Amino acid sequence: MDWKVPIGILILPLAACLLWFVFLHRAAPTSVLFESEGNLVKDNPGFESGEWYLSYEQPGKPGLAVKLSFDSKSRCKRKEVQGLCDMSFELGERVRIEGKKAGDTVRVVTLTYVDIPSESGLAIKLYFYNPALDQGPGGAQCTEKGLVAVPRVIPQTSTPLTESIKLLLRGELSEEEHGQGITTEFPLAGVALKHAEIINGIATLTFEDPQNKTGGGACRTAILARQVEATAKQFPTVKSVRLMPEEAFQP
């Protein structure tokens, strides 16, 4: 009896299965354990729209970022309370990510919020501007869509609004933040905060501006004013902001 034909028929599907198995294993990226602390960022230039990323650093490799992937098994933890991740994150929040990294994406196993002890200072946010997030016909639209919150820590104080605005006016950004496209025109020569008060939810901020550096075109002044207003409104007691004198931050 000639067994050549039946054997050949058996070998062909086995060979095909073997090739498919090899292809799958070569195509699938290798997963490695990932653990790092950094800041949550979103919609920066070069990032996939609408997706959260972790911006972090490693010795000799500043400015790293990985896309974060969440599933039904991902857990978020804050102050020993752990549960499902509801995705209600805020830009700039400090977190620690544990998960599995494949390619440029980390599948999150645990996201832990990093709280700054009160004795170390007061955690605040300063609002700067990223024109890439605020594009429209003709270029940057100078709206609140371009505002970006960056985390900062100030000493414990009874006047956090005053200290936050003063720090904003210094315009200090890290190399990493500059690399993310975040910008600001602050500091401006001669511009300083003279007085700040909150009455009935209205924060009145009075500035010194002897050279009218806060004036100019409508687009420019809108960005400057919105940075100040957003930074002030982070505090629960501030419902609206009044900038004084009236000619400050005006076209």
Image (spheres, rainbow, N blue to C red):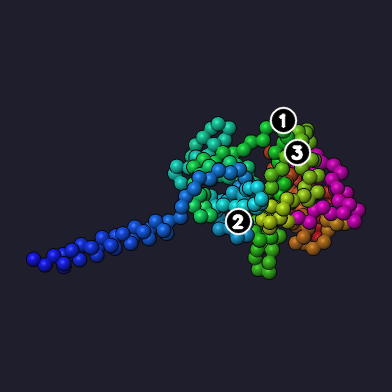
Q: Residues within 10 Å of mark 3 (few under 14, many from 20)?
A: some
User: For the point 79% across and 45% down, which residue is it?
Assistant: 167
User: For the point 76% across and 35% down, which residue is it?
Assistant: 155
Question: Could you tell me residue 164's position as x and y percent?
Answer: 76, 42
Q: Is residue 51 above or below residue 118?
A: below
1 or 3: tag closer to the N-terminus: 1
1 or 2: tag closer to the N-terminus: 2
Q: Is residue 119 above or below residue 212?
A: above
Residue 206: in magenta span: yes
Which residue in the protein does label 3 denote? 154
Which residue in the protein does label 1 denote? 119
Query: At label 3, which amino acid type do we have?
Result: Ile
Tell me if 169 is positioned left or right of 89 in this view: right
Which residue in the protein does label 2 denote? 43
Distance (Cα) linking label 1 and label 3? 11 Å
What secondary structure is marked by label 3? Answer: strand
Query: At label 1, which amino acid type do we have?
Result: Glu
Q: Residues within 10 Å of mark 1 (few under 14, many from 20)?
A: few
Tell me if 60 is positioned left or right of 75 in this view: right
Please tell me in which quadrant of the rendered image residue 188 appears. bottom right
Please tell me in which quadrant of the rendered image residue 116 appears. top right
3 or 2: tag closer to the N-terminus: 2
- Which is in the foreground here, disc 1 or disc 2? 1
Residue 117 shows up from this direction:
yes
What secondary structure is marked by label 2? Answer: loop
From this viewpoint, which residue is outermost toward the bottom?
A: 138
Distance (Cα) linking label 3 and label 2? 27 Å
Distance (Cα) linking label 1 and label 2? 33 Å
What secondary structure is marked by label 1? Answer: helix
Query: At label 2, which amino acid type do we have?
Result: Asp
Magenta range is: 184-211
